[in-house]
Amino acid sequence: VYNFGKSYPLKTRLTMAEQIPMIGEKFPLYKQFSLATTEDVFGKDALAKADHFQANTLASSYIENNGNGTFTVKQLPAEAQFSCIYGIIPFDVNNDGNLDLIAHGNFFSPESETERQDGCIGITLIGDGKGNFKSMKVKESGFFSNKDAKALAMIYMGKDELPVILGTNNNDAMFAYEFRHYTQNRVLLTQHDRFAEIFYKDGKKARYEVNIGSGYLSQGSNSISFVPALIDKITVTNQKGEQRNVFENPIVAYK
């Protein structure tokens, strides 16, 4: 809070004072609060007894499970850092067998002392299967979302069960995007399934876990889309530990 020579009573309390009433009592003037250090506000003894945490990164990131109890954090490309991200969907956009990311976000109603975050216009990140992503321009992907964007979810519609992205905007209409070039098959999972393992012809293996909630205040269709020509088989394990094959080349997966 900046002050240019004058002091004004805290008739309208700062957000911090609303959350911690003693702040308003301790600093009755804007100028006093603006010049106060963290130690002035909370006191040296209270800070010494408090838990101290440190953030190593604030970047939107991809976290890779290395399979040995360790994880690797990789920052997503710069386009994913222009604003906050709320909705995100992992999906093979270009039918190459590698998961890509579709995301959006913004925040138009921050606290009074903070500028709104409005730099996101919709993000499509193409993955290489090794944890690296490259941003696709909006005019190439066709996915555009520049409002106060929140949830994203994937559903399948029509007799051909084509994938459709549903998105929401705060205090605004929902939108939908359909995929024009979709050549994949789909396996539908049930609420009793725990995870699916996908075995690729090149020796790679992927694991898809069934979760309640697939994004910010959203739940998409619980299914796996895949390119049949790239897959050897897909097995699903349910909550009882029972396995079943849902796809095995050259059999076409059921829908």
Image (cartoon, rainbow, N blue to C red):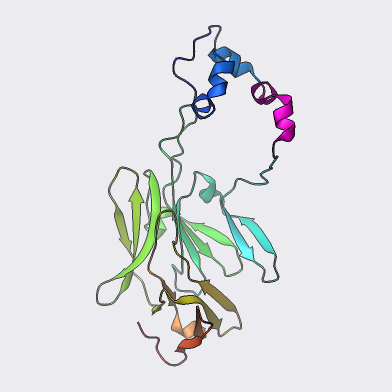
Q: Residue at x 44, y 48 (%)?
A: 105
Q: Give the residue at the far top of this rendering.
A: 6
The quadrant in which residue 49 appears is: top right
Name the one closer to the observer, 16 or 125: 16
The quadrant in which residue 203 appears is: bottom right
Q: Give the residue at the far bottom of this rendering.
A: 250
Q: Is residue 133 above or below residue 222?
A: above
Q: Residue at x 59, y 17 (%)?
A: 26
Q: Position of residue 217 (x, y in %)?
A: 41, 54
The prevailing secondary structure element of the residues shown in magenta is helix
Q: Residue at x 59, y 62 (%)?
A: 132
User: Which quarter of the image is occupied by the C terminus?
Assistant: bottom left
Q: Position of residue 183 (x, y in %)?
A: 38, 77
> How many numbered discs, if any?
0
Q: Is residue 122 above or below residue 16?
A: below
Q: Which residues are magenta?
A: 37-50
Name the one closer to the observer, 78 or 85: 85
Name the one closer to the observer, 144 or 172: 172
